[in-house]
Amino acid sequence: MRVFVTGASGWIGSATVPHLLAAGHEVVGLARSDASARAVEALGATAYRGSLDDVAGLRAGARDADAVVHLAFKHDFSDYAGAGRTERAVVEGFVDELAGSGRPLLLASGLVGAPGQVLTERDPSTFAGPDAPRGGSEGLALDAVERGVGSVALRFSATVHGAGDHGFTSVLVRTARERGVSGYIGDGASRWPAVHVDDAGRLVALAVDKAPAGSVLHAVGEEGVVHREIAEAIGRLVGVPAVSVDPADAAEHFGWLGTFWGMDAVASSALTRELLGWEPTGPTLLEDLAAGAYDHAVRG
């Protein structure tokens, strides 16, 4: 198949493209800059110049594809509402383009459930409507199954970790270096699901080939890693003590990440594993922290 991938040069996309190519697919990756185009081509894919702000261009990319994998997102936490509006417009464009074709539309989503409960693939997203985080794009896409779109929701763990990661875990490492302490919120008992980036990329490639329309998939290798244990591992890496931060001080201490760090989110991937035959094989988050995967964040 010819697979159009947004975010192909990004963290998860660059792990997904090799697995798609290994499965025999032709990959066309969205590239918004010369550097992104070179990165996409270095992976063995074809670069397609455009951006998330050019919905017409994205539709044209989808028009020539047998499947669309939408992994790109504007990670602008200073204007998260604006990022959500952009995301909704993009997904609306893809849905309109693919309607009636049955072609797959796989899109990245998140894992947010009720504290203390294990989120499963059967649980609907709590982000509904155009004003919800990520523009409520998961629900929008899944509703489009009735319009003949092969929509599949890819719910990624809070931390998709590995060497070179610049996401949440990397930010926590840099914060520990800058603050001189590795902080956890309150008693640190909250948990985050985690998955190694290569396992996540392999899941996406399997989903392109095997996931039926309407599927909800969980890219989860570990159901819930305790925040205090993460902070202690980061403390050992940076060489600083792990300390409790009062919830009232979380925003000041962690900045924008304070909104997410401390949230209790536990998720299962049992149904995903059964459906796709997917089994994570990469290192755990704590193993990655101990093995030097985040040394780049310690150095700055």
Image (spheres, rainbow, N blue to C red):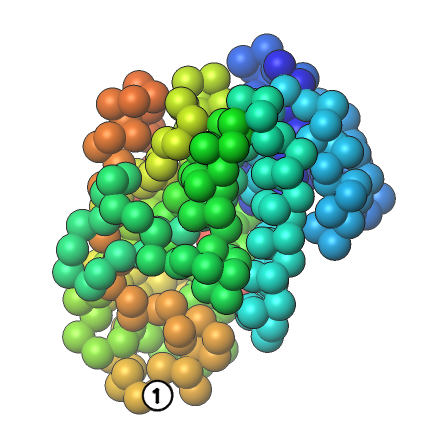
| Residue type of the residue flagged with mark 1 | Asp
Res. 136 in view: yes
Q: Give the residue number, with chain letter if any, for mark 1.
A: 249
Q: Nearer the viewer, residue 148 or 40?
A: 148
Does 248 sit left or right of 98 as displayed?
A: left
> If the image is split into quadrants, where does the N terminus sit?
top right
Q: Quadrant of residue 68?
A: top right
| Residue drawn where x is 57% and y is 42% of the image | 71
- Is the residue 60 above or below the residue 257 in the image? above
Q: Position of residue 9 (x, y in %)?
A: 66, 40
- Is the residue 90 above or below the residue 174 in the image? above
| Residue drawn where x is 44% and y is 22% of the image | 206
Does 135 sit left or right of 270 as displayed?
A: right
| Residue drawn where x is 44% and y is 71% of the image | 257
- Is the residue 129 above or below the residue 164 in the image? below
Q: Quadrant of residue 270?
A: top left
Q: Nearer the viewer, residue 159 or 121?
A: 121
Q: Position of residue 235 (x, y in %)?
A: 33, 67
Q: Quadrant of residue 77?
A: bottom right
Outermost residue, top side: 24
Does 77 sit left or right of 250 as displayed?
A: right
Q: Position of residue 214 (x, y in %)?
A: 39, 32
Res. 240 in view: no
- Please tell me how many numbered marks the rendered image carries: 1
Q: Position of residue 160 (x, y in %)?
A: 43, 47
| Residue drawn where x is 63% and y is 20% of the image | 66
Does 228 sit left or right of 155 as displayed?
A: left
Q: Residues within 10 Å of mark 1 (few under 14, many from 20)?
A: few
